[in-house]
Amino acid sequence: MKFCLRMTAALMMAAPVAARAQAVVGPYVSLGLGGVNTEALGYQYNAGLVPVPIVPGGLGRRLTPNVEGKIVTRPAAGGSLGVGFGFGNGVSLELDAVAQRATVHGQDVSGQKLMMTGGLDSYGVMANMLYTLPLNLPVSPYLGGGVGYQWTALNSDLRSKSAGIYVSGTKVSFAYDLIAGLAYAVPVVPGLTVTAEYRFTQLTTTRHYHLGSVYPLAASEMRLGQMATQQIDFGLRYQFSL
């Protein structure tokens, strides 16, 4: 958040006062690239029946509790490619193709940090409505949000050697996003705008992925919970009507 505030102040100070931003009018295309942070992703699976000491000196078998934990990732890259239409009153509608990558850093199981390797690749389509605030500033702030669907593919190398498991598959989820950005119209190139954008995306559906193991398990699926990402993009927008 501090980074976004500093970026906003720097852009406002650097932009020429004479180049007042205008509302988007007509068709346009946009492109954004940046960094993505994926919040810890909860998971659950049934480990099944295992031999455990039921009484001193003896062994029995019982159903173990569900194994629960969180997948922890490193910041990675993402981007979006959009087509839209501005109505000239500050409102624009946009259809975005989005893609994000998350590199798995490890897992947290009941507070214990364990190794896990692999990656998550998310891609999908979002329909967004954006509104440019009529502040008559050199840099135009805008807000927006929308809904869509995103697929999350787990790399087949998503593995935990300590637990002896590996997870794979591709599943789809309903998603929504919230957007806040800044747009600066380049004076020397009519129709060209430079953008800086923050985007929060939430996948709302619980998904079940294939679960394999070197040990016998009662379950063949791992359940992943809702997934949230935060992304900061820098990009370009071009209006064809200018």
Image (cartoon, rainbow, N blue to C red):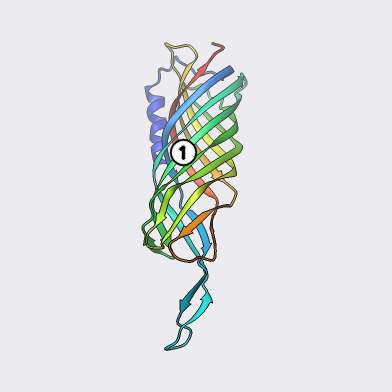
Residue 86, given in percent of the width and then of the height, sits at: 60, 21
Dot 1 amino acid type = Gln
Quarter containing the N terminus: top left
* Location of residue 240 with respect to 33 vertically, above or below: above
Front residue of 126/168: it is 168
Name above or below for residue 82 compared with residue 123: above
Q: Nearer the viewer, residue 53 or 89?
A: 53
What residue appears at the point 49 percent right and 63 percent down from the top-left corner? 68
Which one is in front, 26 or 38? Answer: 38
Residue that carries the numbered disc 1 in the rendered image: 100
Q: Characterize the local packing of mark 1: few (<14), some (14-19) or many (20 or more) Cα atoms within 10 angstroms.
A: many
Task: Give the image location of residue 96, x and y in percent.
Answer: 55, 30
Quick one: quadrant of the C terminus? top right
* Percent x, y of residue 117: 38, 51
Q: Position of residue 124 (x, y in %)?
A: 55, 36
Q: Is residue 34 left or right of residue 84?
A: left
